[in-house]
Amino acid sequence: MMRPTTKRKLTAVVSTLAASTLLASCVTNVEDGKPEGWEPIIPDEVPEIAAMVPEAVSADGVLTGGSNPPFAPFEFKDSNGDIIGLEMDLARAAAAVMGLEFAPVEQDFAMILPAVQAGTLDIGASGFTDNPERRQNFDFVNFLYAGVLWAQQTGVPVDPDNACGLTVAVQRTTVSETDDVRPKSEACEEAGEDPITILSYDTSDNAALALLVGRADALSADSPVTAWAVSRSEGKMELTGEMFQAAPYGWALPKDSPLGPAMAAALQHLIDNGDYERILAQWGVETGLLDQALINEEPVEGISS
C-alpha cells in the first residue's frame, strides 16, 4: 500500500511536470516559435553604412552576437533549436544594413560581456540593460527603453514595494537581481523585517517556472519578459505593481569600439524606414521605442534622425 507521503510527492512531481510543460508550450511558445503573422524583415545593404564597419568585423561578413536564451521575447529557441526573438530580428536587420550576416552564439549570460571584451564576440545581444556600472567597460547601442515588472500567481496578491519575507524568482546577474530584489531585501533587514528570499536562475524561463509551480511568490524581470511570460501562462500568472526603474536596452560592445557608430547608423536607418517599428510590433512591443539611435543614451555625432 502506498504511503500518503509518497502519494503527495508523486502529485507534486506530476504538478511540476505539468507546469513545466505549460511553461515550455506557452511561456516560450516553442511549438510555433514566432508570433502569428510574423514575417522576416531583411533590409538591403546601405553602402555608406557598410563602409563604417571596421575591417576586423567585415572581413568574414559575419556579426557574432552572444545570446542567452530563453529570454523571451528577446531571444529563445524555436522547435528546431534556432535562436529567435525580437532582438535577434533587430540585430539581423541592422547587420543586413551593414552588409553582414548576423550569427547568434549561445552562451551563459554571465560570460557574454567578458567574451565581448576579449574579442571572441562582436556584440552582446541578450537583453542587456545599459547602466552606469556596465558603461565603465562597455558601450551600448540603445534600441529600446523598458523597466522592471513583477508577476504573481493569479489571485495571490503581492506588493513589489512590500515584499519582505517573500520569495522572489529572478534571472541570475540581471538588473532584477542586482538593482531591484537584492537592494529591497537589504532594506527589509535594515528595517528589522525578514529579508526577501531570492531564487536566482540561469534563465528567465526557469525563474518564471518557479512562480508557476509555487516555489516563488513573485517573479521580477524586465517588463517585456514578464509581460510575455504572463500572456502565455494561460491565466496562471498576472502582472502586479507598476513598471519601475525604466532604463535602456542596448547591444554591448567594447568601450570606444568603432563598430558602435556603424551599428547606431544601421539602427537609425531602420528607424527612418519604419523597419524598426515593424520588427518590434511583430513581437508585441509597442512602447519604449526610440526615435533616434543612441550610444549610452547619447546622440551619435554624424547620425541624425
Image (cartoon, rainbow, N blue to C red):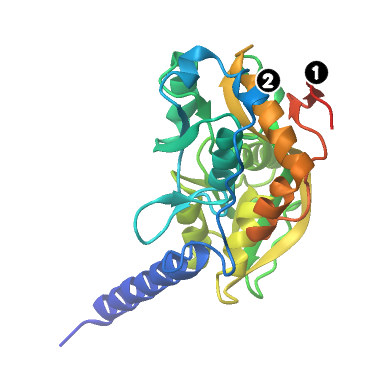
Q: Quadrant of residue 125?
A: top right
> Which residue type carries mark 1?
Gly
Vertical side of 135 occupied by 166: above or below: below
Dot label at residue 167: none
Front in this rendered view, residue 293 or 29: 293
**Outermost residue, left direction?**
1
Cα distance between the residues tagged 2 and 1? 9 Å
In the image, residue 126 lies at what x, y percent? 53, 38
Mark 2 vs 1: CB contact within 8 A: yes
Q: Is residue 139 visible?
A: no
Q: Is residue 271 visible?
A: yes
Vertical side of 305 occupied by 154: above or below: below
Q: Earlier in the sequence, mark 2 or mark 1?
A: 2
Residue named by callout 2: 261
Residue named by callout 1: 302
> Which residue type carries mark 2?
Pro
- Residue occupying image coordinates x 47% and y 62%: 33
Q: Residues within 10 Å of mark 2 (few under 14, many from 20)?
A: many
Q: Residues within 10 Å of mark 1 (few under 14, many from 20)?
A: few
In which quadrant is the N terminus drawn?
A: bottom left
Front in this rendered view, residue 17 or 128: 128
Residue 248 shown left or right of residue 169 in the figure = right
In the image, residue 92 lies at what x, y percent? 54, 41
Q: Quadrant of residue 281?
A: bottom right
- Residue occupying image coordinates x 50% and y 31%: 100
- Residue occupying image coordinates x 54% and y 54%: 72
